[in-house]
Image (tube, rainbow, N blue to C red):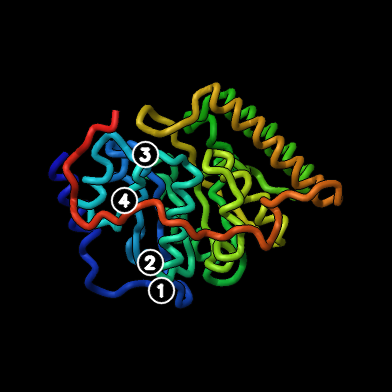
């Protein structure tokens, strides 16, 4: 394990030599992380460092060594002072990437559930002006179930996506992937502070993207389910499903001028708050239990 981390750290720190540039754009990878110590090293090892300008890790008050390992891998690392939720974690990720001048921001989970090697393809689709937002879909192709996606998750994914496509009057293969790339313009314009700090944040973001008319593309991404990968349990999945139904209905009501919701107000609150700190050295592991 130590030799593996030394190799990964050396690769991440080795920034001499020629860098590939995607149409002159600065590409940042942001990683929302929670108890990802067992997977963050492998995730980083497969990143295409020739086109990635910086990797940001935001730790949501993990109880394991996620922060320590992120710093040992020379990743720019931020920690929340308490567990604030998956949605708030993303808000921190995007805010810091924008602050550092990112042109393209790719959100990749630190749990190795998505292939880091697809960062180049996803970022390229934005860098060359084809799309504003790109999703890594586990449904395109036929690998979701073969990759270990539980059957009940696959069925609920297909049902919810079908429902959303109808209410959004749109057509994509999957709304529920956590692998996403955004242009700077999109993240600056979306009223992200009107969104939840919970898992439904993902659904709210895509509702906003479609409502505001941004171009949304997809790329096929293999599914990876294994014990170390994070996943919602059955009760949390049920809650998430109900929230997806409500967000989709709000979109439809506003489109039909039967309701008005702050989440879909282009003048809504943008990213603004300070509630976290940057970690500049590897901390001693703390137990938050």
Residue 139, percent from left and from top:
59, 40
Q: Is residue 130 above or below residue 69?
A: below
Residue pointed to by mark 1: 21
Residue pointed to by mark 2: 51
Estimate how packed mark 1 is, as few (under 14), some (14 to 19) or many (20 or more) residues with alpha carbons within 10 Å.
some
State the separation of the CA atoms marked 4 and 3: 15 Å
Rendered-image quadrant of the C terminus: top left
State left or right for residue 176 relative to residue 86.
right
Q: Secondary structure at mark 1?
A: loop
**Reading the chain from its start, which is encountered first: label 4 or label 1?**
1
Residue pointed to by mark 4: 44
Estimate how packed mark 2 is, as few (under 14), some (14 to 19) or many (20 or more) residues with alpha carbons within 10 Å.
many
Q: Residue furthest left?
A: 3
CB-based contact (under 8 Å), mark 3 and mark 2: no
Q: Is residue 51 above or below residue 234?
A: below
**Reading the chain from its start, which is encountered first: label 4 or label 3?**
3
Q: Is residue 61 above or below residue 102?
A: above
Q: Residue at x 45, y 77 (%)?
A: 24
Q: In the image, which is nearer the foreground, mark 3 or mark 1?
A: 3
């Amino acid at each position: 394990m130590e030799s593996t981390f030394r190799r990964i750290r050396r690769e991440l720190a080795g920034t001499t030599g020629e860098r590939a540039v995607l149409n002159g754009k600065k590409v940042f990878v942001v990683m929302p992380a929670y108890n990802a110590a067992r997977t963050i090293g492998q995730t980083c090892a497969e990143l295409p460092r020739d086109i990635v300008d910086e990797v940001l890790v935001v730790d949501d008050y993990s109880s394991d060594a996620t922060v320590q390992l992120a710093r040992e891998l020379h990743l720019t690392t931020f920690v929340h002072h308490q567990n604030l939720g998956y949605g708030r974690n993303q808000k921190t990720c995007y805010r810091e990437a924008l602050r550092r001048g990112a042109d393209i921001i790719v959100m990749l989970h630190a749990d190795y559930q998505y292939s880091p090697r697809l960062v180049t393809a996803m970022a390229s689709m934005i860098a060359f002006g084809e799309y504003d937002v790109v999703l890594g879909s586990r449904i395109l192709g036929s690998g979701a179930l073969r990759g270990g996606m539980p059957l009940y998750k696959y069925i609920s994914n297909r049902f919810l996506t079908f429902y959303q496509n109808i209410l959004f009057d749109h057509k994509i293969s999957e709304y529920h992937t956590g692998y996403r790339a955004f242009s700077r313009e999109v993240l600056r314009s979306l009223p992200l502070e009107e969104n939840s700090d919970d898992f439904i944040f993902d659904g709210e973001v895509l509702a906003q993207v479609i409502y505001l008319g941004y171009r949304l593309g997809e790329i096929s991404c293999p599914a990876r389910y294994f014990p170390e990968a994070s996943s919602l349990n059955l009760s949390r999945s049920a809650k998430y499903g109900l929230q997806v139904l409500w967000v989709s209905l709000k979109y439809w009501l506003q489109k039909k001028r039967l309701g008005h919701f702050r989440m879909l107000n282009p003048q809504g609150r943008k990213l603004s708050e300070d509630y976290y700190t940057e970690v500049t050295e590897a901390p001693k592991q703390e137990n938050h239990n």
